[in-house]
Each structure stands twice: as C-alpha cells, then as structure tokens.
Image: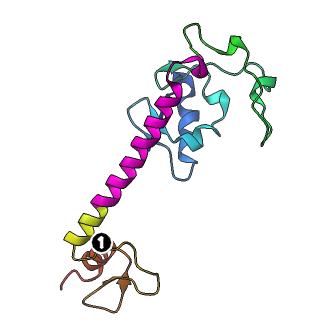
Amino acid sequence: MNLIIVQPARELRVDFARWAVAQTPKVRTCSTTDFAVPPHLFTYLPEHLLVGSLVDGHRYVPVEDEDPEWLTAVPGEALPPVPDSAYGPDSVPLDATPGHGALLADAAESGQAAVQAVTVVQAVEDVAAGGDSSGPSSPSSPPYACQLCPRTFSTSRGRDAHHRQVHREA
C-alpha cells in the first residue's frame, strides 16, 4: 500500500496526532515527526492541519480558490480544459509526449504479466502445501479440512493458522 508521509508543522503536531488516532484504523507514525497517512484518508484530512506541513517531502500549498472551474467535472462528460497556469514551468502535456500510447500499452502488458506471475506462484504454493492447482473450489466444498476437528477452510494458510491457534497441544 502506498502511504503519504506527512510531517506536520511543529505547532500542529498535537492536533494532527489527535486527528490521526481518531481514524479507524489509526494513522500510525513512521518517525518521531512524520505520520504515514493512507491515500483514502488524506483526502479527508482537514486542510488547516496541513498548512505549513511537508507532504512527501514537499511544502503543502493550500488551494486558494475553493472551487476553481477547471477542478469540477461532471460524470460522463469530457473533463474541462486545464489552464496553463495549473502546470509547472517544466511540465510537458502527456498527449504531446512522443510514444505516450506505447508507454501506456507497455504498462498495461507488464501489469497483466505481474498478475499472471502471482497466479502461477499461488498455484505452485498450493501444490507444495498439498492442495491442487485447479483453482479455487466452490464454497460448498472447501478443500482444506482440519484433521483434528470438523472445521474446513478455503485456504491452507487459514487451516494452518487455525491449527496453531486452536490445537496447540496436538
């Protein structure tokens, strides 16, 4: 999981910590001054806690215009054009980048290859654990049964964890 590292301003650390422990699950610290905030919680973080903070090593810049026209979008419609002032001085629009479509296609292919590799590794691990590689079985007949009680599990890992926790003496 990617985390956003926030180093709140010194005067806001206590307030930031109060916000962090009020979340479910709690936002953890990753150093004496930094918090590791999940991206889905970062969007709900009160902006007054970010003023003067470092976010992923960069000074947080508050949004001055509460609802600029170019930030609004309507589902199902094309996005409005973004003004040139929204881009940094060295930025290059993606559609003007040579080979942009090829880069996206390569990224999609490598993502599919990664998913296939994980699937193969899981199948090999299942075979090594005594299961089969035919894929997940139907919910009515879980393949991993506990040898000491009538419980069944959908994965060998679940069965092994149950065995360690419930049948310690056996």
Q: Position of residue 60 (x, y in %)?
A: 58, 21
Q: Residues within 10 Å of mark 1 (few under 14, many from 20)?
A: some
Q: Assign a secondary structure to mark 1.
A: loop
Name the residue nearer the viewer: 3 or 92.
92
Please check the rendered image and state whether residue 117 is part of the magenta-colored stretch, yes or no: yes
Q: Tell me the colour scheme of the image.
A: rainbow
Count the labels in the image.
1
Name the residue nearer the viewer: 117 or 23.
117
Q: Quadrant of residue 15?
A: top right
Residue drawn at x 66%, y 29% is 47
Q: In the rendered structure, which segment of residues is drawn in magenta?
A: 93-121
Q: Amino acid at mark 1?
A: Ser
Quadrant where the image shows the N terminus? top left
Quadrant where the image shows the C terminus? bottom left
**7 left or right, relative to 168:** right
Residue drawn at x 46%, y 21% is 57
Farthest bottom residue in view = 150
Say if residue 3 shows up in the picture.
Answer: no
Q: Position of residue 35 (x, y in %)?
A: 46, 35
Farthest top residue in view = 89
Q: Position of residue 12 (x, y in %)?
A: 57, 27
Q: Quadrant of residue 53?
A: top right
**Relative vertical location of residue 27 with respect to residue 83 in this rendering, above or below:** below
Name the residue nearer the viewer: 144 or 61.
144
Residue drawn at x 34%, y 82% is 143
Name the residue nearer the viewer: 9 or 64.
64
Say if residue 25 shows up in the picture.
Answer: yes
Dominant secondary structure (helix, strand or loop) of the stretch shown in magenta: helix
Please check the rendered image and state whether residue 39 is part of the magenta-colored stretch, yes or no: no
Q: What residue would you read off at disc 1?
A: 133
**Relative vertical location of residue 30 with respect to residue 121 in this rendering, above or below:** above
Residue drawn at x 46%, y 87% is 140
